[in-house]
Image: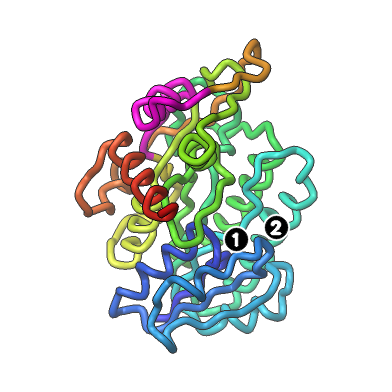
Amino acid sequence: MKVLITGGAGYIGTELCIKLDKNPKVKEIIVFDNLSRGNYNLFLHSQIKPGKLKFVKAELLDSRSLDKVVKDVDVVYHLAAENTDDEKLHHLHEQINNWGTAELTYAIEESNVKQVVYLSSVAVYGNTKDENNSKSIVEPNTSLGNSKRRGEQHIERLGGKIKTHILRLGEVFGYGASLNMDGILNGYMFDSHFVGRISVQGNGKQKQSFISLHKTTEILSNLLDHELAGGIYNLVDENKSVLDLIDILKDLNPDMEMVFTNNHLELPNQVGKADDDLLALYTSPELSFEEELKDFKTHLQLSSL
């Protein structure tokens, strides 16, 4: 089996490569990435067997490279995206999440690909206090959410011919070889441990969906070996407010300080309801949310020795 991972050198992609490397059915892993983040840890610290990993440095909008690389693969994991929730990045959201996904879809339509896994976002639901299930009405109200929804629509075209899984992902947290601090929780963990102070925007009541990196990548990896019906699923685990996170962080770092900015503002929620059928693909021992953060802290302590 040949597997293609767009964005495979990123935070999630690196850990997915490590897991797929251990699957004897996977004979080749092709990473398609432009290395825009300047992260080379996949090549330096993943310890993937020599010869199993092939790297293609290219852009999603490079249709010639896409056509060539997609032609002979069996499974495509589409992780490449601009996930920063910043309206100033509207151009990048459209270029990568929308039109880049369109180019990939065109290439897949002309290939022998049998399975596609697309990482979307709970941002497609917009700002709502409800825990949206995968059949809820989508009302994206941000540049990120709109571009991710357009990406979903491109991938949905494949559903009649190819097994497709569209996974609406919450914020991913936890230690990995290509660790980044883009998410609020990873940033809080770093600042509370190394700086001793976190900065909180708004009143802290805003809720988000979270799922650990380990759980995310194990579920993605296990999609190869399980007959989960194609469709749209929420890849989330826990819904927490910022105030909930602060309570946990204070237990982990009792001396942590907090600075609130614009604490009169009520910031938007981004929450989805977990899909039990999808979470069932996680077969490792279950840890509580608090235990996962404690494990994350242990990795940070080891890295600072």
To which residue does mark 1 refer? Answer: 80
Percent position of residue 70, x then y: 57, 78
Task: Decide: few, some or many residues near mark 1? Use Cα within 10 Å; few <14, some 14-19, many ≥20.
Answer: many
Which residue occupies 66% across, 54% down? 97
Which stretch is magenta? 237-257
Is 204 on the left or on the right of 20, as rendered? Answer: right
Q: Is the residue 134 above or below the residue 228 in the image?
A: above
* Front-lying residue, 297 or 90: 297
Report the number of discs. Answer: 2
Q: Residue 163 location in percent, x, y?
A: 43, 63
Rendered-image quadrant of the N terminus? bottom left
Residue 184 in the image: above or below residue 69:
above
SS for callout 2: helix
Residue 248 counted in the magenta span: yes
> Nearest the camera: 145 or 207?
207
The type of colouring in the image is rainbow
Residue 135 seen in the current view: no
Kindly check if marks 1 and 2 are in contact, taking CB atoms under 8 A apart as contact: yes
Q: Is 246 a magenta residue?
A: yes
Q: The C terminus is located in which quarter?
A: bottom left
Q: In this view, does 153 lie to the left or right of 73?
A: right
On the image, the x and y values in percent for residue 302 come to: 37, 53
Mark found first going from the N terminus, 1 or 2: 1
Residue lying at 60% horizontally and 65% vertically, measured from the top left? 39
Residue under label 2, please give it.
96
**Residue, x 31% and y 79% (percent of image)?**
25
Residue 210 x, y percent position in the rendering: 43, 38
Q: Can residue 91 be seen in this view?
A: yes
Q: What residue type is labelled 1?
A: Ala
Is disc 2 surrounded by few (<14), some (14 to 19) or many (20+) residues within 10 Å?
A: many
Q: Nearer the viewer, residue 201 or 167?
A: 201
**Element on which disc 1 rests:** loop
